[in-house]
Each structure stands twice: as C-alpha cells, then as structure tokens.
Image (cartoon, helix red, strand yellow):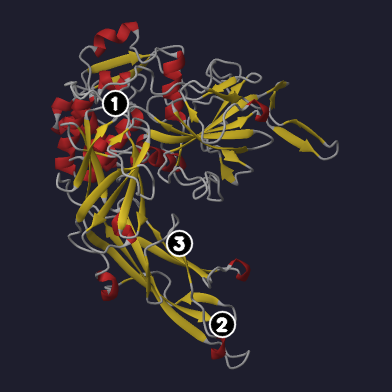
Amino acid sequence: MENKTKITAFKVKKIPLSKVVDNKDYEVGISVSNWDKNRYFVILKVANKVHDDLDKDGLVKVNLYYDESFANDNNYHTLVTFTMVAQIYDAEQDKIIDTKKQDYFLNERTKEFISYSPVPVNTVEGSIQGYWHKNKLVEKVEGPFSDADCKTIVSEVKIGTRYYFRATPKQKLHQSELLAMKWSYRYDDDEITSFNYALESVKGNTNIMSCIFHKQPKEIQVYAFYKSPSDTVSVKFNIFGAEQENKTNSENTSSGKNAIIFPLLVKPENDPGNKWGESRNWTAKQGSNMTTFNADRDNKKRKHAARDLYTNKLETVVAIADGKVLDIRNFYAKTHQVTVLHTLEDGRSFIARYGELDPSSILVKKNDPISQKDEIGKTGKLLKYNAKTNTYKPLMVIDGTVVYMLHFECYSGELGEDLNKNPLSNSSKPYNRRSDLIDSLALLQEGYENSFGNSGEPAEENKEDVKNSFSEKDAKIALKKIHDEYGKEMAKTIEKVYRWECKHFKSLQYKNCGAPGMEVTEGKTPPNYGWDGSLYVDHPEYKPVGLWESFENVGKSGKGGNKQVTDKKKKYIKFPSVEAGMMYLVKFIQRHDGNVGRWHSTDSSVQKNYIKDINSCIPRIVNNF
C-alpha cells in the first residue's frame, strides 16, 4: 500500500526586523500530508545547514542574511540563491519515505525569496541520506529519578507521583531519532505494555521520559528500545508500601470509585428535556448549536473549543477526577478558568480546563492537589461592557433569564503540562488553541452516566445479556487477526475507533453487540438493517445475529451523531463476535478510501475533528503486537 505521508510544499517567510532574534531573519518550513508526528520525523536542510527542530507547524527560524555589498546600485537587482531539502523518516519502519527539494532566489529590492519551480521536486540527496542511523540501539536505562534533571534516583516509587527515566543510545543520535525511542513497562510477571501517557524530552544524547504509575504490584520494570524490549536494557524497582508477601497480581485493583464523574452536581439546563435542551443541547453533534465543540464563533473567525453546560445561578463545579491544578487565570467576559491535570487509576491522563467560572467563587490554588468531587468554584455569567453607560451587562440571556455556565475544555496532554512552554490558548486556527485539543464530549458522557445514570451497572432488562458479554480479550483476538491480514496501521485505526466509541471496550453497546455503534435504519430488514451487506457474501459467519435495544445515553447517538432520542429505545446491530464487528469496520474504511472519519459523519469538517478525536486514543493492544 502506498504511503500517503508526503512533503507537499516548502515555506519561506521574512521575519519583520523588529522581531529578529539572533540574526534569524527568515522562517522556513514544510507542509506534510498525513503527518503522524509520533511516527514520521522530518529534517530540513537549508543553505547547507540541517535542522531537526521544526515546531508543531513544521517551521524553524534560520539565518539567511545576504550581503548588501552585492548590490552595486539601487537599480541592480542582485539575486542570492539557496536550496531547501526536506526528508521524512518513518521511525516505525526505520526507513526514509520521501525526499524533496526546492531552489530559491532572492530579489534584493523586495527582499522576498522566490522559488524557481512551482512545486517541490523529488531528489536523492546524498548529503542527508546518512542523517538517520540504521540499527539504533539503546545502551542503558536509568531511573526512577525524582527530578527532571535526573540527579536523584529512588529505589521505590509512590502511586500517583511523577517520576523520570533516562535512556542513552549506543550511537550519537539526532533529536528526532531520540524522540522515536519507545518506552514500555511490566507489572510483576504480566505482559510488557507500552506507556500511553508518558512525556518525553531530549537532553544531550539522551531521551528523558516521565510518567505516573497508578497500580500497586510488587515490582515494576521499565524498558527503552527501538525494535523490541530487552531485560538487559531496563530498570526494575519496587512500589512503596506494596505488600511483598501478597501473591495476588494487583494490576486490576482499584479504589472502587468511578474513574470520572460529571463536573456539575446537577444536570445541565441544556440537557435533552430541560428548558434549553431543544436549541442548546450540549450532547448534540459537533457544530450543530453554539454549545457544542466546533461551533462557529466571532463571525466564523474561530471555532468553539469546548462543550458549554448551562445552569441556574452559581451552581457548584467539582473535579471530575483526581489531579493537580496547573493554572488559574482570567477567561472570557469577566469570568475565570481553572486548568487541571487529571490522572486516573486506569492509566488515562489528560488536561481539563474548567472555564467561565465566577471569579469570586474559586476555592483552589495553582499547584494544589485535587481529589475527585472537590469543589473548584461556581458557574459564572459572561459580562459585556457598555461604553455608553460605563457598566457591564449579562452577555447570555435566553427568554429573559441570565444564563450561567461551565465551559468544559479538554486536551490529550500530548504537548505536556508545562503551560508556559505550551499554553492552551494561542493563535492557531481554527480554535485558537494548542494542537492536542480534543472534543470533551466522551469524558462528559462517561461522567454523566456515573453521576446521574446507572453508575456503570447494566439496566435491569439488559443484565441477562451482559452475563455472556464481549470483553477486551475478544477485542485483542480480533485485532491480532486484523493486524496479520491488513497490517498494523489498519489495526491501530480499528482499535482507536473502538476505544473512542465503546469507552475502551466497557460500554454496554460493545459488550452486547461487539460493534462501535451500528444503529438500525428505520424500516430496514435483516441481515443488513440498512447497512452495506457485501461482507456477508464472502463471510456468512459474520452476519448479524439479531438486535439489541437500549435507551440512548447522553451524547453521541448511534452512527454520525443523529438527533438524540429519549422517549424510546434505539436498536443496534448485534454481531456474533467482535471479529465480525471489527471486520465490518475494516471493509467500511476501505470502501471510503481510507477515510475513517466517514464512520462518524458525511460532513468533511466534522470528519476531520472525529479523526483528531480518535487519534487521542492510544492503541495499546496493537502497539504490543
């Protein structure tokens, strides 16, 4: 299958003189299609100097200073030329997949660089072909350290505390190659598992990884590697306070509390069925009303980055999970925001921004540890300044009622928790947010069910079904088959869709149906129920075995975010196995030319956000194949 990750364009832009630092007078870079920055790394050679420190937008500032003495007079246009060469390295396959170049000349009068050719051209650039090192090996792993500088090593670690590990390769490597290093861990004698939410940085010729452990086995072993983990290149240590004589593997033990709760103690007033639920339903599909993620803002100049929960006056806002307060500051229209790094017992970690809070109500401080259900503050009201009267008036009023709200925003944490280095708000379009922003809907759904629904227990009429329900083990078996038949990338995509749609294989719909939300089309008959049935021609063993009915939970409804139905049960296709459901999804993606976003919506802009959402899920099962 052809690799679709390609260099599509080069960029050259002069930096205004007032903003030039260290003589770096131009910003150069590239555009790359289908760029998974965790897998594909790029180097850029500009005027014979190689750069591997491109920012998240593929840009780097360089010095392209030209000698003004070249110009003999004001009418003579001196041309200064240079060449840019870019190369993409696939860390997973350890090979170069694309190399392109473009030549530029400088018009000294305009001081603009102009390309000789309209598009980049393919090249074989010997000077950077050897840039990437083959057969990279990790020589040693050190840790756990209690500090980011890796100076103080500890012999035991505590649950919920961040620790640091340092890996040193045998060769002198480049920054991108160091970040391509892989990290895994093992609890006692369990399987070796990839880290899902570790943070990595480069210091010298080492990779520094930091993580938080959430379980309490007797021992933990941490590995760093490029191809496969080895006991000879790892560190092993104890959990502080673990019962050494306890023979029970505690990997699956937990405190018994829900992983996530809802951030309000009451249901929102824009809940389906409540007073503002019809026009401002916070659970609706992206962009469908002003409270949803991806809705237009500022006359379509930007997009909404959160889900807005409307409330009555000054309702209590609580922490959805344990965590640490990262930041407190002003927010929109005379409200405040509190940003929290949440770490869950199930291994998840993410950043939540509790926005549009009443400034006088906030009860936490920066760097405070916070526990689930701790009060953070109260919902606030947006205020608009009236210059004529020199007063503020409520900005959001519906039918004469002032709306108070919680603006709940979420980030995967991929860019780390240092908000000075990577602030949540910036000028990046379309959200004016950093790039690891995700739709918070799934987290709110999970919390809503735990707080107001059935607390994770199946409804009475579904308990019999769940006795013999599908589990994560079924998913692992099916994903291995897909991995072997269709490749690792397809298997990763399938796992990410299932994790997003099926709450990491824990939803009732998954347990009963084995599929990620295949709703029956009204009036359609078996076995297709309104869906394409070509898969069943060659594989009759995959035909659906019936239907499963349930009242829809808040949030995404079936496939594609249709209008939510609350007065009757919805019908979902029930497969004989998880393999059947996953194989159906494989064929669906293939029919739509690899566009997994089509599973969620026919709207291309919604598809892009869906792809971003599912990519926030880590395919931890496939990563271990």
Gap in angstroms between the C-alphas marked 2 and 1 = 69 Å
Q: Using the numbered discs, state the Cα–Cα distance from disc 2 to disc 3 in whole angstroms.
A: 23 Å
Q: Residues within 10 Å of mark 2 (few under 14, many from 20)?
A: some
Q: Nearer the viewer, residue 383 or 518?
A: 383
Judging by the rendered image, the residue that carries numbered circle 1 is 241
Percent from the top left, x then y, of residue 186? 21, 36
Residue 394 located left or right of residue 83: right
Work out which quarter of the rendered image holds the C terminus and state it. Answer: top left
Residue 108 is labelled as 2
- Earlier-in-chain disc, 3 versus 1: 3
Q: Nearer the viewer, mark 2 or mark 3?
A: 3
Which dot marks residue 59?
3
Distance from Cα at disc 3 to Cα at disc 1: 47 Å
Q: Is residue 120 above or below residue 467?
A: below
Q: Residue furthest bottom?
A: 72
Counting residues from the start of the chain, the first of labels 2 and 3 encountered is: 3
- Side of 374 where 579 appears, left or right: left
The picture places residue 505, in percent across and down from the top left corner, at 28, 26
Query: Toward which corner of the image does residue 479 lie, by quadrant?
Result: top left
Q: Is residue 10 visible?
A: yes
Q: Residue furthest top?
A: 460
